[in-house]
Each structure stands twice: as C-alpha cells, then as structure tokens.
Amino acid sequence: MIARLRILGVAFFISLSTFGQTVSDYFEKIRNNDALLTAFFAQMPKGGDLHHHYSGSIYTETYIDYVVSNNYFIDRKTLKVSEKKPPGDDWADFSTLKQEGTFAEYRQKLFQKWSVKDYNHVDYPSDKLFFETFAGFGVASRAEIDKGLLEIKNRAKKENVSYIETLFVNAPCPKDLTDLTDFARKLRDGQAKKDTAACLVLLDSLYTAIQAKNVRECANTFLNETLNRLHTSLKIDDDQFTMRYQSYVVRTVEPVELFKAMIVAFEAAASSPLVVGVNIAAPEDNEIAMSDYWLHMLMFRYCHAKYPSVKYTLHAGELALGMVKPEDLSWHINSAIYLAGANRIGHGVDMPYETDCYDLLRYMSRKKIAVEINLFSNEFILKIKDDKHPISLYQAFNVPIVISSDDAGVLRTNLTEQYVLLAKRYKQISYQDIKQYVFNSIDYSFIEEERLKKSLLNDLKQRFAKFERSVPGVRH
Ligand SMILES: [Zn+2]
C-alpha cells in the first residue's frame, strides 16, 4: 500500500513538473539522450543548409544504381569505375559480376570506397579517404543531375529543411590558356614577396587576357543549358522548399587555370539570381592549396572589385594541428576575412591558432560574418570534436553561427544529426541559441530576392510555432 502511494506520488510529481514546462525545459531534460534528441531535431524546422556540396550530399546507393543500370566497368583490384572498358584484364562490367554472383561483394566495396561506410579508423587516413571519394564516384555524379537534385530536395523536405545553398557542378570552360602560363611564375614571384600591389596589376592584365577569350560564354552556356533548365523543369522551388546554388573553384589547380575558373564562377553569380555566391573548395592542406593560399585570397579581393554585388563564402581553416606546420594554422581565416573579404567562412576550425584570434572574432561579430559549422565532417576529416572544436569560441564572441551538413552522402549523415551532436556536446548552447542558429541560416544566406528571404523567415516562424506546440508536456 505504502509502495503504491509512493508510486502515485512520483507520478503526481512528474505530472506537476511537466505541467507548464517550456520547450527549453523539455530540451534540457533530453539533451543527454541521443534518441530523444534525434526525435526532437528531426521534427524541428532547420531553415537552411548553407554549407552543402551537391555531389557529396548524394548517397552512394544512387551512384551505384547509375553505374549498374548503365553497365559500366569496374577494375576488380582498384575499384575504379569507367564508362568504357579500359585496357587490362582486371576490368569487368556489372552484368558479368551479377552473372558470376560477386556483385554484392563489389557493391559493399564500393560503399567503402565512395563513402565512410564501415570505416574502421585504422586502415586508411580518414581525410584521404574522404577526399578520394569524389574522384571515385565522379563518373556517376556528373550524370543524372536531375535525379541528384530531386534526391537532395526530397530528403531536405522530409528533414524539415526549407532552403539549401549547394555548391553545384562547375561550368566547364575548356579555353586554351597556354599562352598565359608565364603569369603563374610572375604571380608566384609576387606572392613570395607578398607584393599586393604588383600582384593586383598582374591579375588585372590576366583578367583582360582571359576575358578576351570569351570565358563569359562558358558561364552563360552553363546557366542556360544546365542550371536554369534543370531548376525550372524539375520545379525545384515550391511552397515548402527553395534551392539556390554556389559556383566554386578548386584550390588545388595552377593559378592561371584557377583564376579562369574564378572569373567564370563570378560571371555566373553576377548574371543569375539562382547562383547566389562563389566558394573555394578541395583539401586545404594540399601542396598547391597551401603554397598559393595567399594568392587565392588576393584573387577573391580582385574579383570583389570587379563584381561588387557577388557574395562569397570561403572554406577557411579546415585544418588541425599535425596536418600542417603550426604556423600555417595561424593565418588562413585571417586572410579569408581581411584580405579576401569573405562574407561567410566555412569550417573555421583552426580559429584558436589564428594570429590575434580575439580581434578576428570581434571583427567577425561586428561585421556579421557568419561561420558555417560542420560538426560531423570536422570529426571525421580533422578528428576535431567535443571541446577541441572552436564552436564555443565563436559563441563566446557572438559570431553568427549556422549549422550545416557539408557532405551528408559521403559522410552517411544528415542535418538532424548535426543538431544532435551540437546539443549533446555543447551544454552551454541553449534551445534559444539553437533556434537563433536556424534563423541565421536564412538571415545569412546569400538569397538575392528580399521578398523570398522574408517569406522563408515567415514560414520558419510558423513552422516553429507548430513544432513547439507538438513538444511533449509543453504548456500552450
Ligand atoms: Zn565543404
């Protein structure tokens, strides 16, 4: 009897304590529990995903389906996949693998080669595996872009994501620049002396020479024949979802080629409201990426003067101690902000090592330069997680934060999981802070149409009201 009364008492106490609780109260109660947090964040509206790579966001299943249905060839030893059969005895087409009963085995191997599935953190460097996946599935990711865009859109809608700003396929521009290769040597000489004025004069001559080859045509062809056509015909935008695109350059190529790609990227962004910004991607510790980093930042500064309305976000400080010399952890975010004039930065993981990082953080806060935080990506590629991650530093200095997914397909994750990691790992970040990060993801997006931005913000408010009404035990 006494035991029964006690149980009734506990039940009464629980019901009293939940009566009148707020969403924040409920959130604090569940923040140590993965499954409860997952249920919470899966339903919470997440606004925009602003750091999102198109090809890295598609799941491997889609790529495998494509190469199988087109009966491509696979090298049994290296697992390279090719449309046509290259010379050598190790190549077999997928129908042969099915006939001989080995397809399931190769399918599993492709999962491990094209994504982080089954990765054991022992056999192979994680950053190498991650960046090599793109070359592996490139043969499939360049095809069937329509299916890829729809996959991303449909997954986003199911996850309560209303906006994506994706780093999309680059505009091809096969213009011959061999007569301009001498510029590379001169630019690197200028870089060695950190001679900003001389390099800007060189870039101006190079810009004129490249434009004389009519590279604008590359941007226009890509916009008309690929992007605008797909975006419209697939009806990507609807009343619950909007997609915009970033064009980008790859930081591992020679300076003249990179500058051409940057001009094409800025041209595309300047002439289409669908292309809302420019980015720079690829491994930041690559040899060329490291040696030409300063030059790349100067190129952005130059392009900003030519295309003042075009916004850009730069992957900067995606580095960890041990990957590069310690002194090289001290200046990439500084240069992306002060020299290149980035509107947002991606990752920003080496912030604690940056020279005068307090001043840099204050500057980012004052100028409203947001940082795109990619928690699982940083954990996998850089082995930076928990309190090694500088998110608390950004929060302490009131730098605008957005939470993003980076490459959910390769990393076998989603945006929901990023919020779960955020809540579990950083207890000083409240529900109200997280809600602010979600609103930031629309506020700090590069959407050009003001009306669209406003309507996405209004929609987000309504979604939050509905979501908060659904949270268990919350007073209404
Ligand atoms: Zn990225």
Image (tube, rainbow, N blue to C red):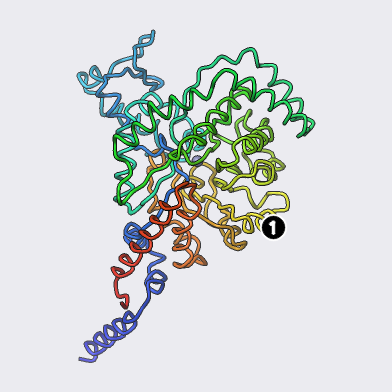
Q: Where 165 falls versus 212 (above or below)?
A: below
Report the side of 101 relative to 86 (left or right).
Answer: left
Identify the image quadrant of residue 168.
Answer: top left
Decide if ligand 1 comes within 8 Å of the CB at mark 1. Answer: no
Q: Position of residue 137 (x, y in %)?
A: 39, 28
Q: Residue at x 51, y 46 (%)?
A: 378
Q: Position of residue 394 (x, y in %)?
A: 59, 58
Q: Residue at x 61, y 59 (%)?
A: 393
Q: Position of residue 436 (x, y in %)?
A: 47, 62
Numbered-mark total: 1
Q: Quadrant of the C terminus?
A: bottom left
Q: Where 352 falls versus 176 (above or below)?
A: below
Question: Which residue is nearer to you in this view: 374 or 86?
Answer: 374
* Residue type at numbered disc 1: Tyr
Q: Where 146 falls versus 83 (above or below)?
A: below
Report the side of 144 relative to 443 (left or right).
Answer: left
Q: Position of residue 43 (x, y in %)?
A: 32, 59
Mark 1 — residue?
358
Q: Using the rendered image of the protein, determine whether residue 57 is visible from the camera's viewpoint.
A: yes
Question: Which residue is nearer to you in this view: 256 or 13?
Answer: 256
